[in-house]
Image (spheres, rainbow, N blue to C red):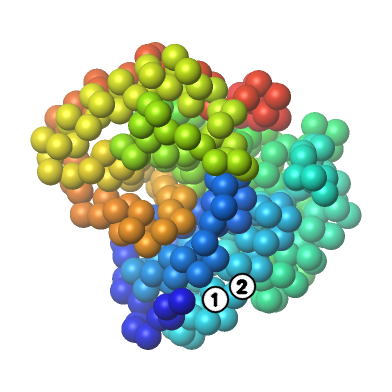
């Protein structure tokens, strides 16, 4: 296992909304280091977090249900073994609320105020810290008004246990209701070349309210990374084996779009993944709102590739060529199985 010995470099930064923190323009999503993508190498995961910190990444995203607490413990271990300079710059973004079974199943979401505070207490202990930088419920609890859930996080802010309030996968109406209770730093939501639904009402509402966007799934779980092939076999525990966009004819159609994107990328001398990430990076200035992509790199080589997107400059012609190569109307399959789509307030 490697450890950092140098002072972290400074990546460009973006502020999360009008009230949120200043963070690196690219964040590291750590979920895959613990869950849902098959087995992960613990030493390589920690080395990847160290490499991200060393490269100037300050935003580490996790969820208390990723590996039932495993991911938070992993991040805590990585931060403990990082130099003080890197550790002090790191910001934690934590999702909570998902209910799990011992077998790994999912049984809903709990946004009741007492549950919110209970989840936070456990996360603080696992992370080994006295505060969480951004705290958000992973999915809206349909049985609890969002005002009550956000109000409970606001009380954690007042108590000093949380610095900023975030949301995840909520629609425009819920975004407005939440913002009426307390300042919302950012909305974490899927956004990529093949998942552009937020552009209709959610993104304009976030801009109006001064709420930033942390975009996950910018490579659509690897689908538009250029690394997935038609004969790709997913190992046990990798949820992509059940993801509609990775199934049969859907996968064939989507990889045709990736092939078209590859042609654009090769013309610029960059990789497919870098092109897809650079496109999301460009949407902040383009739309008048700051958007921070989260890359789910589990290995240092994938992290290095993603960081290369920071050096790509896309002009209007480049953006038009990318969007022409991957028109959203031609994307095949929903982004989640039907049962999980039903949990998304953002899709209602």
Q: Is residue 70 above or below residue 306?
A: below
Q: To which residue does mark 2 refer?
A: 76
Quarter of the image where one finds residue 124:
bottom right
Quarter of the image where one finds residue 118:
bottom right
> Label 2 crowding class (10 Å Cα cut-off): few <14, some 14-19, many 20+?
some
Q: Residue furthest right?
A: 114
x and y, in percent, of residue 288 in the image: 36, 40
Mark 2 and mark 1 residues within 8 Å of each other at the beta carbon? yes
* Visible residue check, residue 52: yes
x and y, in percent, of residue 201 in the image: 51, 25
Q: Nearer the viewer, residue 169 or 181?
A: 169
> Label 1 crowding class (10 Å Cα cut-off): few <14, some 14-19, many 20+?
many
Q: Is residue 224 left or right of residue 87?
A: left
Q: Is residue 113 left or right of residue 125?
A: right
Q: Is residue 118 above or below residue 75?
A: above
Residue at 63% across / 34% down in the picture? 170
Quarter of the image where one finds residue 47:
bottom left
Q: Is residue 81 above or below residue 308?
A: below
Q: To which residue does mark 1 refer?
A: 79
Residue at 59% across / 75% down in the picture? 77
Q: Nearer the viewer, residue 33 or 315?
A: 33
């Amino acid at each position: 296992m490697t450890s950092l010995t140098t002072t972290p470099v400074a990546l460009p930064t973006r502020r999360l909304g009008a009230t949120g923190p200043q963070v690196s323009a690219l964040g590291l999503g750590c979920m895959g280091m613990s869950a849902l993508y098959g087995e992960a190498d613990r030493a390589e995961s920690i080395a990847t977090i160290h490499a991200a910190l060393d490269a100037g990444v300050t935003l580490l995203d996790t969820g208390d249900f990723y590996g039932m607490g495993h991911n938070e413990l992993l991040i805590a271990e990585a931060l403990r073994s990082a130099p003080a300079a890197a550790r002090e710059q790191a910001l934690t973004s934590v999702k909570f609320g998902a209910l799990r079974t011992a077998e790994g199943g999912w049984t809903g979401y709990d946004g009741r105020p007492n549950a919110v505070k209970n989840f936070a207490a456990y996360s603080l202990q696992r992370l080994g810290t006295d505060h969480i930088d951004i705290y958000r419920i992973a999915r809206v609890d349909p049985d609890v008004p969002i005002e009550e859930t956000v109000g409970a996080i606001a009380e954690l802010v007042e108590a000093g246990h949380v610095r900023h309030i975030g949301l995840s996968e909520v629609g425009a109406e819920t975004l407005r209701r939440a913002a009426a209770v307390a300042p919302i730093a950012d909305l974490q939501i899927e956004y990529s070349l093949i998942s552009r639904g937020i552009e209709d009402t959610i993104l304009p509402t976030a801009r109006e309210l001064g709420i930033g966007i942390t975009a996950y799934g910018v490579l659509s779980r690897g689908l538009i990374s250029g690394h997935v092939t038609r004969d790709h076999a997913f190992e046990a525990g990798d949820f992509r084996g059940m993801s509609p966009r990775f199934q049969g004819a859907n996968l064939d159609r989507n990889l045709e779009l990736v092939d078209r994107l590859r042609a654009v990328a090769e013309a610029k001398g960059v990789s497919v993944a870098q092109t897809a990430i650079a496109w999301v990076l460009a949407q902040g200035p383009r739309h008048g709102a700051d958007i921070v992509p989260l890359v789910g790199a589990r290995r240092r080589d994938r992290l290095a590739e993603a960081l290369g997107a920071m050096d790509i400059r896309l002009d209007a012609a480049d953006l038009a060529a990318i969007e022409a190569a991957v028109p959203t109307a031609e994307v095949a399959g929903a982004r989640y199985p039907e049962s999980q789509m039903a949990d998304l307030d953002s899709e209602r």
